[in-house]
Image (cartoon, grey):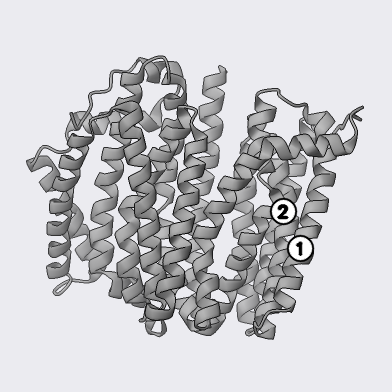
């Protein structure tokens, strides 16, 4: 098997597992929301959000950096693994101690503190698995991570649901379920390392402090990017807990889960195009721009009708998935879903910036996004409550889109005017589709009105000749190519030029 085929095969394993894991996680949260009640959902969501922000300091970007450094043979797996594990142990225990102290001296209620303590234990155990998986990724052994993801999610679901049914009110058992999943990840990753003789560590002549210094030097850019992303992704729940109460966190969390669950689509798309974009940079910039244009067009075509449909059906979705106790989340969802377009489009934009070797600009844009998110949250949450957090989410993702789009327009000189025109057309069709869904759900069940809206949307795309048979073939080719070299030789007819 050629190296390019191996990369595609391994990426498909992990992408497929991630998509399934994402959907299962949404279903699991939906079940929990009904089983444990609004306030407990708030406590549970807060504990995870609070700990996830701290968890990035346990890893310090090592997992991401390892993939790059080991795959490029910059460092040796066997010489550095022992030092990295000691470093990870020191960092994890130190951060866990600070996490516990920060919560112990806080004004949070006792049950929330216990949940954070348990979540911290989970993050410590899981941080080692992420390092092991990073080593396997660097050796193109992604199937173990794919298997681990699947077993991990099934373990969490089974343990968490059983705990909620047998021991109602014992919220810490939901974190024990995560601990069981983290243990599974460690077992699977260690098995992969042992099978491929990657646990046979060689003693390095370099002093351990020198090795740690080198680790920090090559990991810090990845750490910064991850820290910024974690803060603007999870700080809203923490601030809602501080300014308001657990119910506010719960209402925001259930609304957030719906657009968040759909992220598997742009993630899968980005994974499919990244190898091609990276290889084409500097060799054929016209094809690179063509692939970017295709990605932006297709993701706009997918996200806008979803945006319109979810906005119209927000009440039906919240009541069906979570129940009437979560009705205040309807207004929050209608704001959050407006950011779905930006979420989808930001993935290929970020992928394009990384593929042309300018990751530092991604880090800068994410930092600015974090600042905007924090400031807007601090201003609006005391005034508007969870809706203020939703507006902060919309503003920050919109700002990230604007910065990335304008940057790539200047660097790659792609046909941005045509993208704006096509997006405008798609907005018009999506609004009309939303009206069709709104009218039809008055006379048929809402899930059937979705089918009516999809049929209308597809028909309008064909009538306006926005999406043709040739476009469908090109979209299929992006995901079915078995050889990267063949993909590079394909002539991409730009759909928006």
Examine the rendered structure and indicate whether residue 22 appears above or below residue 8.
below
Which residue is identified by label 2? 58
Residue 127: where, in percent of width, then height? 71, 52
Residue 343 lies left or right of residue 359; in this view the side is left
Q: Nearer the viewer, residue 465 or 244?
A: 244
- Mark number displayed over residue 257: none
* Quadrant where the N terminus is found in the figure: top right
Residue 195 in sight in this render: yes
Q: Are marks 1 and 2 in contact (CB under 8 Å)?
A: yes
Residue drawn at point x = 68 percent, y = 79 percent: 106
Residue 407: where, in percent of width, then height? 36, 36
Residue lying farthest left? 463
Residue 321 in sight in this render: no
Which residue is identified by label 1? 96
Examine the rendered structure and indicate whether residue 55 appears above or below residue 323.
above
Residue 100 lies left or right of residue 8; in this view the side is right
Residue drawn at point x = 13 percent, y = 52 percent: 429
Residue 474 lies left or right of residue 481; in this view the side is left
Residue drawn at point x = 51 percent, y = 35 percent: 359
Circle 1 — which element?
A: helix
Circle 2 — which element?
A: helix
Residue 350: where, in percent of width, then height? 43, 39
**Pointer 2 local density, CA inside 10 Å: few below 14, some 14–19, many at least 20:** many
Q: Nearer the viewer, residue 134 or 470?
A: 134
Whichever of labels 1 and 2 marks the residue nearer the N terminus, that label is: 2
Residue 409: where, in percent of width, then height? 30, 33
Examine the rendered structure and indicate whether residue 200 appears above or below residue 486.
below
Report, in whole angstroms, how far the alpha carbon at label 1 lies from the one at label 2.
8 Å
Residue 153 lies left or right of residue 101; in this view the side is left
Examine the rendered structure and indicate whether residue 418 appears above or below residue 162.
above
**Pointer 1 local density, CA inside 10 Å: few below 14, some 14–19, many at least 20:** many
């Amino acid at each position: 098997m050629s190296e390019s085929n191996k990369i595609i095969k391994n990426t498909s394993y992990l992408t497929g597992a991630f998509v399934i894991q994402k959907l299962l996680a949404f279903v699991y949260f939906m079940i929990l929301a009904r089983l444990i009640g609004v306030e407990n959902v708030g406590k549970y969501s807060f504990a995870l959000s609070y700990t996830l922000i701290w968890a990035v300091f346990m890893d310090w970007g090592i997992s991401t950096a390892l993939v790059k450094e080991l795959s490029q043979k910059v460092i040796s797996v066997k010489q550095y693994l022992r030092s990295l594990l000691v470093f990870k142990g020191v960092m994890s225990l130190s951060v866990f101690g600070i996490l516990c102290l920060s919560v112990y001296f806080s004004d949070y209620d006792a049950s929330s503190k216990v949940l954070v303590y348990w979540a911290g234990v989970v993050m410590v155990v899981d941080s080692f698995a992420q390092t092991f998986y990073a080593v396997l990724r660097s050796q193109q052994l992604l199937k173990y991570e794919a298997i681990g993801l699947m077993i991990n999610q099934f373990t969490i679901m089974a343990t968490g649901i059983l705990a909620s049914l047998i021991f109602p009110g014992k919220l810490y058992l939901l974190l024990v379920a995560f601990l069981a999943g983290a243990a599974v990840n460690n077992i699977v990753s260690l098995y992969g390392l042992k099978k491929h003789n990657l646990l046979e560590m060689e003693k390095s002549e370099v002093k351990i402090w020198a090795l740690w210094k080198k680790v920090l030097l090559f990991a810090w850019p990845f750490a910064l990017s991850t820290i910024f992303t974690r803060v603007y992704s999870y700080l809203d729940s923490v601030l809602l807990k501080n300014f308001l109460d657990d119910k506010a966190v719960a209402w925001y969390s259930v609304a957030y889960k719906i657009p968040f669950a759909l992220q598997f689509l742009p993630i899968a798309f980005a994974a499919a195009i990244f190898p091609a974009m990276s290889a084409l940079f500097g060799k054929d910039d016209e094809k690179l721009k063509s692939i970017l244009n295709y990605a932006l067009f297709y993701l706009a075509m997918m996200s806008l009708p979803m945006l319109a449909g979810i906005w119209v059906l927000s009440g039906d979705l919240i009541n069906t998935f979570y129940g009437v106790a979560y009705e205040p989340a309807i207004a929050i969802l209608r704001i959050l879903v407006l950011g779905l377009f930006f979420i989808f489009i930001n993935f290929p934009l970020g992928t394009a910036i990384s593929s042309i070797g300018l990751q530092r600009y991604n880090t800068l844009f994410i930092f600015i996004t974090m600042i905007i998110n924090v400031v807007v949250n601090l201003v609006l949450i005391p005034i508007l409550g969870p809706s203020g957090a939703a507006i902060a989410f919309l503003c920050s993702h919109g700002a990230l889109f604007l910065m990335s789009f304008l940057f790539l327009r200047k660097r790659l000189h792609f046909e941005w005017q045509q993208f704006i025109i096509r997006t405008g057309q798609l907005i018009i069709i999506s609004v009309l589709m939303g009206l069709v869904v709104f009218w039809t759900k008055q006379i048929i069940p809402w899930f059937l009105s979705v089918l009516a809206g999809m049929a209308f949307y597809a028909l309008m795309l064909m009538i306006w000749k926005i999406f043709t048979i040739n476009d469908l073939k090109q979209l299929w080719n992006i995901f079915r190519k078995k050889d990267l070299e063949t993909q590079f030789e394909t002539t991409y007819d730009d759909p928006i030029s």
